Image (spheres, rainbow, N blue to C red):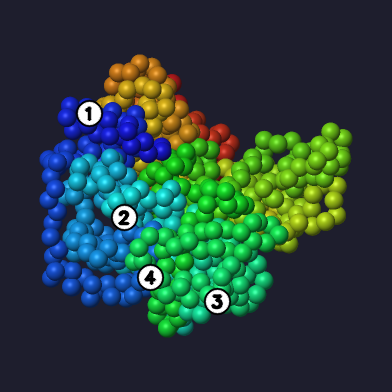
Amino acid sequence: MEYNGKEVLSAWKKFVNENILDATHLRPEIARSWLRCKEYGLDPWSSNFDKADEITLAARRKRYHKLMKAAEPVLQYLVTLFNCNASLADSEGFVFELLTPLSVYSRTLGTYVVERYTGDGNLPLALIEQKPMRVDGFEHYRAVSQNYSGVSAPVEMPDMRYFLNINDPFLSLPPEALDICVAAGRLWKELYLADRQTLFSHLASATFFDPILRIAQLAVIVVDQDGMILTANEAGKLVVSGYESYHYAGQSLAEYLKDRSVLCTLLNTSQSAEGPIEVSFKGNRRRKRLDLHLLRSRTIQLQNGISHHLLIFDLPDDAPQTAEPPVLGRHQDTSADYVGASPAWRNVDSIVRKIAGHKSNVLILGATGTGKEVVARAIHRLSGRKGEFVPINCGAIPRDLLSSELFGYEGGAFTGARISGAVGKFEYANGGTLFLDEIGEMPVDMQVTLLRVLQEQTITRIGSNKPIRFDARIVAATNQDIEQLIQEKKFRSDLRYRLSVIEIQLPLLRERGEDVILLAQYFNELLGASLSIPTAPLSPEVQQLLSRYSWPGNVRELKNVMEKALIMAGGKPLTVEAFPAHIQSCAGAQPLPVAEAVLEESGLTPKQQREQREKKLITTLIEKHRGNLTRVAKDMGVSRNTLYRKIYKLGIQIKVLADDGQ
């Protein structure tokens, strides 16, 4: 949901003055936070803030010294990019490090920034939601904070989860701020975990910081102390195009300036200089001369003795556009049902965050409706890749058309082909992520072609002999038993190994425990807003009902059920009667025990973890239904034959009772 200051302010006034929560224009996280702030008894008009606890601050800075040292260059990059505060906090919300461009900033450092005491905000909500969060303007519960705009990203370290924060007390952060914060957190972790040799290797090239620079929309150029270009983001390359054809630090910024003597001014201009400085860059065959405003300039000293000089320019409106503007923006992503707090889902989330920044292929396994595309989009969103997320359902396209969809074709390649030809999904996903959904449905002969494409990283359009190199991250998914497909010769084992460099098994919704209610509350608010239906928090009776149903259709079924219930309730608070009869029939049943999450430290392989969870689930359902396998299969959303195979494969010993006729 995009932030609308006028609508959010109206909702805030109604909530503060009339105690009425109108969540139509509020994100669910904000609405939940306002309710908690009210329960805490926080005064929205209070302007009090805790003073720094100098003793605790000194102790924690000593304890976190290595963390702070690793974060220093990352924080300096962030302060230069955004011209605002960047800080670090621990899992208790205690802010132990803060860099600011302001001469004095007395808030937050050395204090606990938690919701109960400070109200909502990017850090308090990131602590509660355990995910990257952004909070703007009137989304803040306390009026004193409503000039602020902030983002926070959790960073998983070996000892605990820390938080990287960016806060502007005067202006709204740009749309890409949250994605930059997430990418910066990964760089911080990488520097922290590196040994001395690896650390110096990382910092030897400014391209190490490219994951945060390439998301920025302003033109960023990084030079050394002599003005030699080290790196630039996409907008910056419009100004210094061609520098990459030289070796690292082999081309001077002066070559692009209309007046070469201006380089000395740029290198000696501090960030505190009053007002932007106009800088003229030469034109070339592709573009006219550019007159840009230097917004910020800052020298960053690294631990290896090297210095980077960051130059931030504002591109004029008529400047050429970059080839592909970033399409990230977690706070604007429509697939926001990446929601969960259960151990099973936290395990998935942990894997996603570990692997997102790497280009390795990913295979996502999970039953229908468990959220395979949601997870694939999260991987892309957190990857920092600036290209598109391109999904294709391999089972929904006729085999005769699948080749042209994936690889494209030249004009006139076959009867009915467009004269101009067509770009395939691989080309369209260049620089981004290609999501191959239902990969298990792909014909075997097409699998051979796909395997070769993945090996060579090139595609050839139909009707052409010219190979085209592509740079796309491949994420595949299937709801089928991939090992059984291989045994039945319906899927190539070598393709499976090529795709599953990293394999993620998604849990069934019934295995996610408290996530059922979290998701139900989320859909209640989200769908209520989209359908223009007033909503109220879910009653204990409704929550109890939803927690007792087995959800064979997983998250997708829950979303559809919530939509139907909201419509049937007609704007009144949801009751048990608003839900379908087959769900109401579970009202007297016992809640399904949740399969215990298997921690990575257990030493079990992903396959063994899946089998252990599945065995636990089947035995629980068999006990619940007193050996009636028809009902067990129905609860699991599989056929009886599939259930028999699973029982045999997992070595489950059962005693089947005669059907009691109920």
Amino acid type shown at disc 1: Lys
* Residue ID at (13%, 65%): 53
CB atoms at circles 2 and 3 under 8 Å apart?
Answer: no
Q: Nearer the viewer, mark 3 or mark 4?
A: 4
Mark 1 vs mark 2, CA separation in Å: 27 Å
Q: Which mark is residue 116?
A: none
Q: Nearer the viewer, residue 283 or 488?
A: 283
Q: Position of residue 214 (x, y in %)?
A: 52, 59
Q: Position of residue 109 (x, y in %)?
A: 21, 63
Can you tell which quarter of the image residue 161 is in? bottom left
Q: Nearer the viewer, residue 545 or 447?
A: 447
Q: Is residue 569 visible?
A: yes
Mark 2 vs mark 3, CA separation in Å: 32 Å
Amino acid type shown at disc 3: Met
* Horizontal relation, residue 164 to residue 338: left or right: left
Amino acid type shown at disc 4: Ser
- In the picture of the structure, the residue carrying the numbered disc 4 is 270
Q: Which mark is residue 14?
A: 1
* SS at badge 1: helix
* Residue ID at (50%, 49%): 328
- In the picture of the structure, the residue carrying the numbered disc 2 is 167
- In the picture of the structure, the residue carrying the numbered disc 3 is 228
Mark 3 vs mark 4, CA separation in Å: 18 Å
* Residue ID at (23%, 38%): 34
